[in-house]
Amino acid sequence: SPLLQSPDEGRTDTALGGSGTESQQDGGNNPEADGTERGSDRTDESGGYDEMGSSDELPSQLGTGNRESGSDIRLEYYDRTHEDKSLPFFGRDEVINEILRTTPHLSASLEEIKDYYERNPDNKDRTEYIKSIFNNDYTELTLEDGRTVGYKTFENVLHLWEGKYDSRTAQSFYDWAVIARHFEAMRLLGELSDSIKPLPSMDGQMTFILDGRAEEKKTSAFTFSQEIIDAVLANGSGFSEGKMRIYEQFEKSLSAKENADFLKNEYGWGGSYPVIIGAGIDESHDGKGITITKGIGKENPHITLSWSQVEKRIGELIRMDRYLNPKEKERYPQWLESQEERRAKIEETKRNREILSNAPPEQEVEPTEKEPEEAEQLQDVQYEYHLGDKVYIGASEYEILSVDDERVMLYDYDMPLFNKEFSRTEFDRKVRENPMNEHLIVKEEPAEERNEKEPEPVVPAWEQKKKVKGFDLHPDVSMAERHTFNLRENEVETVGKKERFRRNIMAIQLLKKCQEENRFATPEEQIILSKYVGWGGLSEAF
């Protein structure tokens, strides 16, 4: 592979030299070299960076290239197992965009790339297209500020470096999907044209925002175009299946206020950094709305859209069929069908619980002369309990933690931090009232088998009661050493959200510790556990 030195049209020619200041990260590598990686915490694939690097000898051949040199070339695969981490990471968005925008060795012009992107919204198609138009040479360019940079293509990554190839000062390896997103960022920023034009004004591009009194603060010439705002909104809420839920909500033809309230709840508190890879644009959202920023810091350009403004624009995008991309639109019917099936199951479970909770309690009917056998069978039904058995009290499901002659302790699946306690008499009655507890009934042995066994000696009732088996989580702990927590004597005071969050975390950690140590909580620990109040109203904690 020859080393191409770009004439850098209109700039001073320099042979592979220069020094870096802003994001000094160097790179370079040969097909057989070790890789380097440094300093980026952005993720792979859907916006992530694939960073690698290597130190190699300078290719022996030098040459020149042409625009067609990138077509129909079989690229070699870069092996990440030999990464060299001795060089800093090379990765400022503006520098990468300048390299991609100014290299004269692509087989397509910027206008042609822009046209392809506008006709093909699929990210996978765009990625393959961008990879196909690059030349396969070791190529070096001179940036506007005089620095020398370079690149080399591989099947899986694009290698970028700063400085001369044989004395690189910084380098990085980017997944092709990330490079394709950099071109999309330049398109949104108005930079993807052979003669760059200034971005459209706010008056021309954001009428709906100005009419809605969006709050925009600018400290530079940068302005947020309508297309940038639409790209941020079309990114969804940031949660799995968020765009599908939003699309479904707007298809219900509800009021604007209902849709705005839904969006506020769906987004919650959070953000995406960056929301548009390669553009330096971030997004954050809270109870007031969505804020879009260019760069980090309050002094940088940013704009805030209220939830009513967000609702209005998303509705317009859906009506123009520009909210879901083609693949999402293709998948939406199957997603909607699965959601309807899920809701039907939830409704069925809810109805069953209501039926059970509203069912009248069984009434004890004295046996009549016509039904002596049936009455005798009802009285003879016996229930047997074991540690870990599931039992239903009303419509709620519990697990038996301990049982003896006096009391029964149950584990509540809905509120795992608090156990349910019943007297033995009350527990037996509630078990008999619920037909869902039939699995606890002792099955009667056939008459023949009973006759074969030797008759058991007659034991007085008070002696039988002493022999009832009891089950306890910790039989080694005496009853005198146990402490039954009374919530009424330890009322939970009203505190702020941060304190509620802290108490929830402390209670969960303590519960886990008690389970790991296989012991009851001490009285002091029970007070900590009692302050667990759930996560209602704490959505911003996630």
Image (cartoon, rainbow, N blue to C red):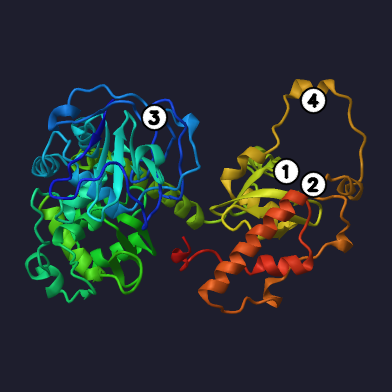
Whether tag 1 and tag 4 are in contact, CB under 8 A, the answer is no
| Quadrant in the picture for residue 210 | bottom left
* Numbered disc in front, either 2 or 3: 3
Identify the element where label 2 is drawn.
Answer: loop
| In front: label 4 or label 2 | 2
Q: Amino acid at mark 1?
A: Tyr
Q: Amino acid at mark 4?
A: Arg
x and y percent of residue 497 in the render?
Answer: 51, 73
Residue 419, percent across and down? Answer: 67, 58
To which residue does mark 2 refer?
471
Label 4 crowding class (10 Å Cα cut-off): few <14, some 14-19, many 20+?
A: few
Q: Residues within 10 Å of mark 2 (few under 14, many from 20)?
A: some
Q: In the rendered structure, find residue 385 and report the number of the disc placed on it.
A: 1
Query: Label 3 to label 1, Cα distance in Å?
Result: 72 Å
Give the CA distance from mark 3 to mark 4: 86 Å
**Could you tell which of marks 1 and 4 lies nearer the N-terminus?**
1
User: Residue visible at 79% across and 25% down?
Assistant: 450
Other-residue count near label 3 (Cα within 10 Å), few / some / many at <14 / 14–19 / ≥20: some
Give amino acid for label 3: Asn
| Residue on which disc 3 sits | 30
Q: Nearer the viewer, mark 3 or mark 1?
A: 3
Judge from the rendering whether residue 42 lies leftward or rightward of residue 261; answer left or right.
right
Can residue 237 be seen here?
Answer: no
How far apart, in angstroms, are the residues tagged by discs 4 and 2?
27 Å
Q: Earlier in the sequence, mark 3 or mark 1?
A: 3
Q: Earlier in the sequence, mark 1 or mark 2?
A: 1
Q: Earlier in the sequence, mark 4 or mark 2?
A: 4
| Residue under numbered circle 4 | 450
- As rendered, which of 304 and 503 lies closer to the eye? 304
Left or right: 408 with respect to 367? right
